[in-house]
Image (cartoon, rainbow, N blue to C red):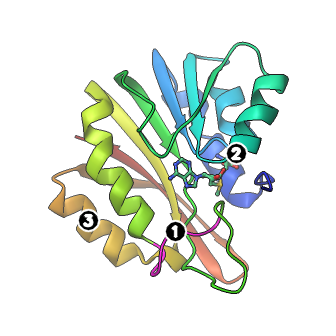
Amino acid sequence: MNIYEPREDSFLLRKHLKKYAKGLVLDMGTGSGVQAKEASKYAKVIAVDINPDAIKHCKEEYSNIDFRKSDLFSNVKEEFDLIIFNPPYLPTEPKAPDVALDGGIEGWELIERFLKQAKDYLKKEGVILLLFSSFSKKEKVDSILKEENYKYKEIDKEHIHFEDLYVYEIKW
Ligand SMILES: C[S@@+](CC[C@H](N)C(=O)[O-])C[C@H]1O[C@@H](n2cnc3c(N)ncnc32)[C@H](O)[C@@H]1O
């Protein structure tokens, strides 16, 4: 499997970690480890990915971070001060399936699965930083957040190529 090469979305999310990373941080879908590496400057980090190649690569690269293979929270039991997620957020592309990009048939289904589970892994004052794209349908993400009773605000936005990228601060 390929490992997701950091790009605009990765860098947009990463620039907020200095402010938000503290205590114990979970980097969900770590890929190359770009978010985990930055967060580890300020906090203790656990980082997970469903892609075993990403985990193997990251374990060889960074010794101060706890990397685990996990489908979302399946291999996580801790509670976190911060959960970071730059998810696969594109609608399924049947001709070229890619676990780093495929967010579900409409693009938001994995985000929904994540948000339904994430609240159980947050400390009382814990925060989620979620990046997503206009391709994963902002109105749908907003409605999932409301249904799941999260409080949230947009803290950053960037227009690239044919899409808008959003960063949300989410609390439970
Ligand atoms: C868009 S990439 C982001 C990678 C990296 N965090 C970054 O910011 O560059 C999404 C990552 O989520 C991982 N992923 C996809 N589905 C997952 C799942 N169900 N559980 C955990 N990780 C998953 C992919 O393997 C990929 O590494």
Q: Which mark is residue 31?
A: 2
Q: Secondary structure at mark 3?
A: helix
Q: Nearer the viewer, mark 1 or mark 3?
A: 1
Give the x, y percent position of residue 87.
Answer: 55, 56
Quadrant of the snapshot with the C terminus: top left
Going from the N terminus, do you reach mark 2 or mark 3 first?
2
Give the x, y percent position of residue 100.
Answer: 66, 60
Q: Secondary structure at mark 1?
A: loop
Residue type marked 3:
Ile
Q: Quadrant of residue 8?
A: bottom right
Going from the N terminus, do you reach mark 1 or mark 2 first?
2
Q: Is the residue indicated by label 2 positioned so its CB lies within 8 Å of ligand 1?
A: yes
Residue at 69% across, 42% down? 52
Residue at 23% across, 49% down? 151
Residue type marked 2:
Gly
Magenta segment boundaries in residue numbering: 101-107
Q: Which mark is residue 103?
A: 1
Labels 2 & 3 near each other (Cβ < 8 A): no
Q: Which mark is residue 4?
A: none
Separation of residues labelled 2 and 3 (CA atoms): 25 Å
Q: Residues within 10 Å of mark 2 (few under 14, many from 20)?
A: many
Residue at 53% across, 29% down? 19
| Residue position marked by numbered label 3 in the rendering | 144
Q: Note whether 49 is above or below 19 in the view shown.
A: below
In the foreground, 106 or 97: 97
